[in-house]
Amino acid sequence: MTEPSPDTTQQAAFEEVPNSEATAPVEDTTPQDPMTVLALEAERWKDMAYRSQAELDNFRKRSAREAQETRAYANADLLRALFPILDNFDMGLEAARAESEKSMIFMGMSMVSRQLQDFLRESGVQEVEAQGKVFDPNLHEAVAQEASPSVPEGTILRVTRRGYKLKDRLLRAASVIVSSGTQPPAQA
């Protein structure tokens, strides 16, 4: 009996191993023009560069907008903490006015009040207009309703605590008393 040659054993072993290329999808193996391949590759890189540039521009714009907004509203927490102090100062100013408008205490407190109002204005803070305005739940907080024969329903009668805005953002709503209109006469 003749022994199989080494070439045929290798051939038999090779045939037993499943061919992974046979199960893979058939690729187009036709040779392409190298210039076409390079042009497609260049177009792909060019598209990627344009997209990256657009993403970078958008990132820069978004970062600049966020930085500007952060600067514009950075003092909001400090101002919110200052408002109760201003409320108490205003009550003290009214008490000094009740005693005498010519007293040195009232005059000094009036000067400080003007300085505080100037500071708030320079910081971009505006007082929320409320007195005599129509109640707006976005700007006002109703603490009570009162009947009023001369003021229509939904109009603000009095302000119990001033409200403030920083540029276009509401920092504190104004606490107000709202008219409920004319009270119908009580029936006996």
Image (tube, rainbow, N blue to C red):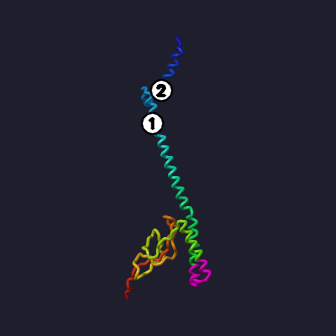
Q: Residue 186: percent from the left, percent from the top?
A: 39, 86
* The image quarter in which residue 70 lies: bottom right
Which residue shows up at 58% across the image and 84% down it? 100
Q: Residue 179: percent from the left, percent from the top?
A: 43, 78
Q: Of the numbered discs in the image, which one, if any, rests on residue 153?
A: none
Which residue shows up at 47% across the image and 69% down it? 139
Could you tell me how far apart the alpha carbons at marks 2 and 1 are, in whole angstroms? 36 Å
Name the amino acid, label 1.
Answer: Glu
Q: Nearer the viewer, residue 78 or 119?
A: 119
Q: Give the vertical position of 70 relative to 38 (above or below).
A: below
Q: Which residue is mark 2?
A: 19
* Secondary structure category for the residue under label 1: helix
Which residue shows up at 48% across the image and 28% down it? 20
Specify the quadrant that holds the C terminus: bottom left
Name the amino acid, label 2.
Answer: Asn
**2 vs 1, front mark:** 1
Q: Which residue is mark 1?
A: 43
Query: Is tag 2's residue or tag 1's residue first in the polypeptide sequence?
Result: 2
* The image quarter in which residue 31 lies: top left
Q: Residue 173: percent from the left, percent from the top?
A: 50, 70
